[in-house]
Amino acid sequence: MRWKLFADLAERAGDDEIDVSVDDSEPTAGDALDALLAEYPQLADRVFTADGDLESHLNLLRNGENVSDTGLATPVSDDDELALFPPVSGG
């Protein structure tokens, strides 16, 4: 599956699109995030709270749809595109 990262997350990773694989028969977005963080541990403090929860201000999408209701428990498959992005402001 492919992660798309935005704003400072892409800057920290040094890339805005990253392919990961998950060795699980029923992978979740949490498994995919673990795979991403295994390759890019510098993202962990920006993605998780001190308690280990996903930062509430981050948006998590699967194939362009917000999955905030199911969050990291969202089922995913190898051909999914996942995205993480912080809120952005502009003017």
Image (spheres, rainbow, N blue to C red):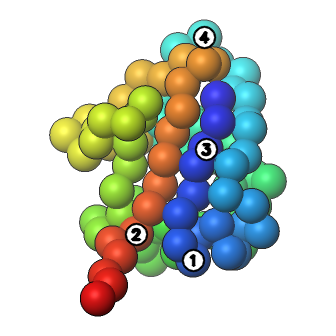
Residue occupied by mark 2: 86
Q: Nearer the viewer, residue 91 or 86?
A: 91
Q: Residue 4, position in %: x, y?
A: 58, 49
Q: Residue at x 47, y 55 (%)?
A: 84
* Amino acid under disc 1: Asp
Q: Residue furthest bottom?
A: 91
Label 2: how many residues lie within 10 Å, few (<14), some (14-19) or many (20+)?
A: some
Marks 1 and 2, how far apart in space? 8 Å
- SS for callout 3: strand
Q: Is residue 20 visible?
A: yes
- SS for callout 1: helix
* Amino acid under disc 3: Trp
Report if the CB atoms under discs 1 and 2 are less than 8 Å apart: yes
Residue occupied by mark 3: 3
Marks 1 and 4, how far apart in space? 32 Å
Tell me if residue 81 comes above or below residue 77 in the rendering: below
Residue occupied by mark 4: 25
Marks 2 and 3, how far apart in space? 14 Å
* Amino acid under disc 2: Pro
Marks 3 and 1, how far apart in space? 14 Å
Marks 3 and 4, how far apart in space? 19 Å
Residue occupied by mark 1: 8
Q: Residue 91, position in %: x, y?
A: 29, 88
Tell me which numbered mark, 1 or 2, is placed earlier along the sequence: 1
Left or right of 39 in this view: 67: left
Q: Residue at x 57, y 77 (%)?
A: 8
